[in-house]
Image (spheres, rainbow, N blue to C red):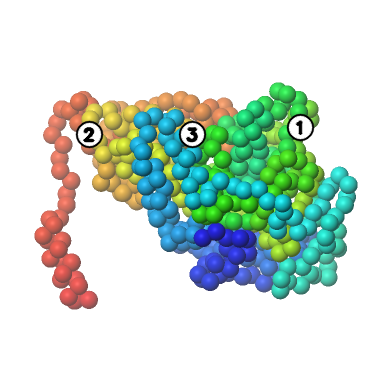
Amino acid sequence: MAFTSFNEFLAALEEAGELLRINEPVATELEITALADREMKKPGGGKALLIEKPTINGEISPFPVAINTLGSWRRMAISLGADSVDDVASDLGALMKAKPPTSLGEAVKLLGTAFQLRHARPRRVATGPCKDVVHKMDSLSTRSEAWPPAPDWKKPDAIDPAPPSLLNIPILRCWPLDGGRFVTLPCVITRDPDTGERNVGMYRMQVYDDRSTGMHWQLQKVAARHGRRYYEAGERMPVAVVLGGDPVFPFCATAPLPDGLDELLLAGWLRKKSIDLVKCETNDLEVPANADFVIEGYIDPKEPLREEGPFGDHTGYYTLPEPYPVFHVTAITHRRDAVYPATIVGIPPMEDFYIGAASVKLFLPIFQMNFPEIVDIALPAEGVFHNLVFVSIRKTYPMQAYKIMHGLWGMGQMMFTKYLVVVDHDVDVHNTSEVLFHLTANTDPQRDSILSRGPADVLDHATSEIAVGGKLGIDATKKLSGEGFKREWPPLIRHSTEAQARIDALLKSIG
């Protein structure tokens, strides 16, 4: 289903028993994230939290905070309007198999065609709920009320009815050593100045003051590439930041789509309804009309970079300060019933594990188009996304595991994978214990491993140089004679099918 608002999604979570309301005041400074971290560490990801009375420097904000809304398999499925993420992946896989491509270029072309089905292409509209309240920073003018109350919401007397700014949105300070408050779930919209193609990415934003933030897009990201073109031309780069709205937006912003393929096409296909787009107030970018908040602004290539961080990151460690572009806010618009969406990252398991794992499930058919032997892929929580990847393959010839290693290291964000383990088709890659058993049982470290070197995650603190590091691939499959193995491979110990069936019947009879 297509959610018309973030509030509608929260209502669906509550109806499904997936939402906890917290009606006591909780501070945006460290307290909300401490609460959310405990919830995310519970089995299955805990519940989504709606903080109804978040406080900013001790004063209650009129905007509730929602966190951990995508932090379980069930909530991910609800956000995609499906019974399970696997169902969505099956639908996409069926589309991909309609006309098998013979090259990566054909795969990308077919993917673009598939996303235009079922009204996937966005449509332009004159206005929308995201413009219930419009505040332009340059003219200090405000349209509608500055702090209009949401339905069933009483505005606290303690809040001064000042125009919205970054300082009175309940943006969280996540960890004790963080450099400040960080917007952690932003959908950042940029445009390629050469082709006009839109990109929606997710890059944390450190709040510097009431109308400027850092923009932490790493050098390998699409928005960074857009930025380099504006820097070369010496022109201001328009940027729009979307918060809230349909929950597919943050999911699509983190999806591993090929460069140049619009994330809003994927969002439209997932929600089975076109996304209504409205033009920004202070630049020419278009944003989803049902967003909760839209922060408009620009990056000035003539301005020096500014130090950003530290930040408690998904690696489980703080990212130390580094220079990044400054985002200047020119307007903030929002819904009357706006809810501020947030997340927290850190030592796994966290909410981002489910978002990343859902992406892998959804895009597995695309990997399989290029590598038909792939059976499944898993990114264990301990690997904090791409540090550790398990791949199962249906092996038919010598050195096939190494072909998969090199192939995956050459695909998009898989280039960041530090440790890549390939196992046979009958190994459950989502069972880390089972993978480790086959890893230690089936390998000779000297024969079955390969060291390589290439691009690394900018956030990886262990590399000797930023964005450059080593990679280790391990072939944990059964060895063939053509791979230098001259002995007989022993059979794996298993119970007989007949004995298993007999025991199943016996256990059923005794309850």
Q: Which residue is mark 3?
A: 412
Tag 1: Cα neighbours inside 10 Å, few (<14), some, or many (≥20)? Answer: some
Mark linked to residue 396: 2
Question: Quick check: 444 left or right of 120?
Answer: left
Question: Quick check: 143 left or right of 422?
Answer: right
Name the secondary structure under disc 3: helix
| Cα distance between the residues tagged 1 and 3 | 28 Å
| Cα distance between the residues tagged 2 and 3 | 26 Å
- Mark 1 or 3: in front is 1
Q: Which residue is mark 1?
A: 236
Q: Position of residue 42 (x, y in %)?
A: 49, 62
Between 168 and 139, which is closer to the camera in this rendering?
139
Query: Above or below — where is 342 with respect to 237?
Result: below
Between 367 and 381, which is closer to the camera in this rendering?
367
Residue 157 in view, yes or no: yes
Residue 31 in view, yes or no: no
Name the secondary structure under disc 2: loop
Query: Above or below — where is 141 with respect to 363?
Result: below
Pointer 2 or 1: first along the chain: 1
Report the number of numbered marks: 3
- Mark 2 or 1: in front is 1
Question: Quick check: 85 left or right of 467?
Answer: left
The amino acid at mark 3 is Gly
Name the secondary structure under disc 1: loop
Between 135 and 393, which is closer to the camera in this rendering?
135
Outermost residue toward the top in this view: 232
| Cα distance between the residues tagged 2 and 1 | 54 Å
Residue appearing at x 56%, y 34% in the figure:
260
